[in-house]
Amino acid sequence: MELLSISDEKDREAVEDILNKYRSERGFMRAPINPKITSAWGDGTAASTADRPSYAQERLERQSSAQKFCDWCDRCIAAMPKQSHQRLLRIRYCDGPETETPDGTTMAILDISAATYTRRKRNALLAAAWYFGVTPRKSSEQ
């Protein structure tokens, strides 16, 4: 049995948070544009005298930000040396279908057992921590 440091577990959680954000940002980027919002309906915010960017401008800025974030995540995953880690992370977090049980769906796509999947996922998240900048490289590796 391998004992892992607390920082390893925190690193995995941090990478998983980043990849979950990737999934939501990618969804926003690909969402259809809402119909035009008229002054009679508003955009859900309180009326104010302060200048506010238009809905279209806000959407374009958010879409641009989401695109940059997703591109950064894609580059981090592509930089990982093991293709098995890349494939697992892409299926589970990036390109896989939206389901109620994403881990189960990923296991089915990869055609691996639950134990193997759990081990590979833990290893892939830990390996990705360095590429996502979550954990600094140890001095012995530099």
Image (spheres, grey):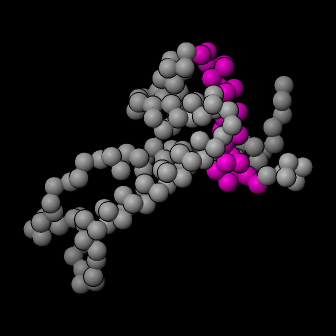
* Residue shown at 16% from the left, 55% from the top: 35
Magenta includes 26? no
Residue 16 drawn at (x, y percent): 59, 43
Q: At which x and y percent is residue 32?
A: 25, 48
Is 72 on the left-hand or right-hand side of 84? left
Prevailing secondary structure class for the magenta stretch in the rendered image: helix
Question: Is residue 128 in the magenta section?
Answer: yes
Magenta extent: 112-136
Drawn side of residue 58 relative to residue 67, left or right: left
From this viewpoint, which residue is outermost toward the left? 40
Residue at (68%, 52%) from the top-left corner?
Answer: 134
Which x, y percent locates residue 87? Answer: 57, 30
Towards the viewer: 37 or 32: 32
Between 113 and 79, the residue placed more toward the observer is 79
Q: Quadrant of the N terminus?
A: top right
Residue 14 appears left or right of 51:
right
The residue drawn where x is 71% and y is 48% is 130
